[in-house]
């Protein structure tokens, strides 16, 4: 589950959101909201999956949500579209890792060549993205075709520790740089005046994004949990692992950024523009850059696999389609849907906002409403507490009914106001 949750949202999005929203205030709010919203959010989506033994294509309908079949197919389409552009971004990470590997060999490679231009068209970028996206989709398909135990779990057991090893190595090197203390203080020194409504809701939106809440991936993986699994304990452990990855990424990145006089609030470019400059300014920085981008590649690859599993499991559960037939069909669909956002960032960014941030928040809200209002209360209590639910489980049921959907709705409203309408203030 940690392998599902940890991805670009932790190592790329979390640090740049910290930089954009003032440092320690965002970090503290994120930790609080991860416990208050993230933990129950995971329990809700796992309960939905385990109680129905279905992914989103069947879970919403079987749980009793009106129009549940249509909701399932809508979320299926969102995941299929999102996986295309997300695999593009994984390809960027792979190309950056290749650039770091070639640096000590005297074979300079401009890693930014794979990034889509701001506008217009770049033949070089398009060709590079086509090649890397196709290769990564094939690799994801090969893992998915092997199934949960032989494919996904084996990949997770190798790649998830690699993420943490790479972050710890970079953290140690970053903290030993002259001037790193300024970055550490900025990242950890909390100032109450920095807490604003915008920062609160931004942190909440990051919790939803980072934990892969969205009524899709965690529902599918929940359907694989055995009846004896303690959802409360597993949710806490998953949030701790996921939050640790984002927190370590910040500890590894911001001391180096401050030590080298770079800009912490550089936004999405923090990973792909600022960090390579930081590595270039560190003696032997290519080795740390290689380790970092390889670790990030592993994390992003696992998140892509999780999305792929939603699609393959959905076709299997609903249409009875075997994986050997479903995987090639999904590969072709993802590749076609990956083409438009390859062209330039004027297409990629709205694509991401619509099918990534917007689609994920919408799915998380639907899952919360289904569990809190459509699912029978007795079924929910059984999922949370087994045969003998206690006072805590009854409290959690109330929390899932009222607080969780309200919080996700607030995050969605902020996303619409800030990223779609551009009217959200501090």
Image (spheres, rainbow, N blue to C red):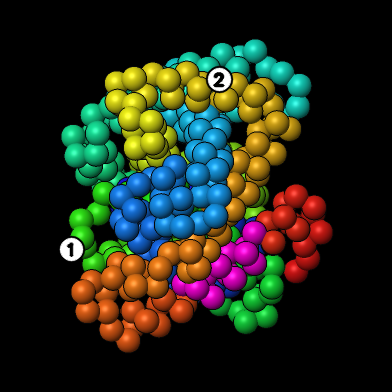
* The quadrant where residue 139 appears: top left
* Residue drawn at 37 percent across, 81 percent down: 394
Residue 405 is a magenta residue: yes
Position of residue 320 measured from the top left corner of the image (x, y, whole percent): 33, 30
Helix, strand or loop status at disc 1: loop
Position of residue 164 measured from the top left corner of the image (x, y, whole percent): 31, 51
Q: Residues within 10 Å of mark 1 (few under 14, many from 20)?
A: few
What is the chief secondary structure element of the magenta stretch? helix
Residue that badge 1 annotates: 228
Q: Up-down: is 143 above or below 394?
A: above
Residue 269 is a magenta residue: no
Query: Residue 243 got which mark?
Result: none
Q: Name the one closer to the observer, 241 or 67.
A: 67
Q: Residues within 10 Å of mark 2 (few under 14, many from 20)?
A: few
Judged left or right of residue 284, residue 143 is left
Residue that badge 2 annotates: 336
Q: Disc 1 or 2, which lies upstream in sequence? A: 1
Position of residue 114 measured from the top left corner of the image (x, y, whole percent): 57, 24
Report, in whole angstroms, how far the alpha carbon at label 1 lies from the one at label 2: 41 Å
Q: Name the one closer to the observer, 236 or 125.
A: 236
Q: Up-down: is 196 above or below 87?
A: below
* The quadrant where residue 388 appears: bottom left
* Residue drawn at 18 percent across, 34 percent down: 150
Closer mark to the observer between disc 1 and disc 2: 1
Q: Identify the magenta region.
A: 400-412
Q: Is residue 211 visible?
A: no
Q: Quadrant of the C terminus?
A: bottom right
Judged left or right of residue 85, residue 399 is left
Judged left or right of residue 352, residue 327 is left
């Amino acid at each position: 589950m940690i392998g599902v949750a940890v991805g670009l949202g932790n190592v790329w999005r979390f640090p740049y959101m910290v930089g954009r929203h003032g440092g320690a205030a965002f970090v503290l709010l994120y930790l609080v909201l991860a416990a208050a919203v993230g933990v129950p959010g995971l329990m809700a989506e796992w309960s939905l999956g385990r109680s129905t033994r279905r992914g989103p294509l069947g879970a919403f309908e079987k749980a009793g949500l009106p129009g549940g079949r249509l909701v399932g197919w809508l979320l299926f389409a969102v995941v299929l579209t999102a996986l295309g552009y997300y695999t593009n971004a994984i390809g960027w990470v792979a190309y950056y890792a290749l650039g770091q590997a070639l640096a000590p060999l005297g074979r300079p490679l401009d890693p930014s060549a794979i990034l889509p231009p701001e506008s217009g068209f770049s033949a070089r970028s398009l060709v590079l993205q086509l090649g890397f996206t196709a290769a990564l989709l094939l690799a994801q398909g090969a893992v998915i075709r092997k199934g949960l135990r032989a494919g996904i779990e084996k990949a997770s057991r190798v790649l998830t520790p690699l993420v943490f090893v790479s972050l710890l190595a970079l953290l140690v090197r970053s903290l030993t740089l002259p001037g790193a203390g300024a970055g550490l203080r900025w990242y950890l020194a909390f100032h109450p005046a920095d807490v604003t409504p915008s920062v609160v809701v931004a942190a909440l939106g990051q919790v939803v994004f980072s934990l892969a809440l969205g009524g899709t991936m965690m529902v599918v993986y929940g359907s694989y949990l055995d009846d004896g699994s303690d959802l409360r304990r597993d949710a806490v452990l998953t949030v701790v692992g996921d939050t640790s990855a984002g927190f370590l990424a910040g500890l590894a990145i911001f001391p180096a950024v401050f030590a080298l006089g770079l800009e912490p609030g550089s936004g999405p470019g923090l990973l792909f523009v600022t960090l390579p400059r930081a590595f270039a300014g560190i003696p032997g920085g290519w080795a740390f850059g290689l380790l970092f981008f390889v670790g990030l590649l592993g994390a992003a690859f696992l998140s892509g696999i999780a999305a792929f599993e939603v699609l393959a499991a959905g076709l299997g559960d609903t249409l009875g389609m075997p994986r050997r037939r479903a995987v090639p069909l999904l590969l072709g669909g993802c590749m076609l849907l990956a083409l438009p956002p390859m062209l330039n960032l004027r297409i990629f960014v709205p694509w991401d906002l619509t099918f990534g941030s917007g689609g994920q928040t919408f799915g998380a809200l639907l899952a919360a409403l289904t569990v809190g209002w459509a699912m029978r209360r007795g079924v929910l209590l059984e999922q949370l507490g087994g045969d003998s639910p206690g006072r805590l489980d009854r409290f959690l049921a109330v929390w899932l009914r009222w607080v969780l959907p309200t919080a996700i709705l607030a995050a969605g409203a902020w996303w619409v106001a800030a990223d779609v309408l551009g009217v959200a203030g501090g």
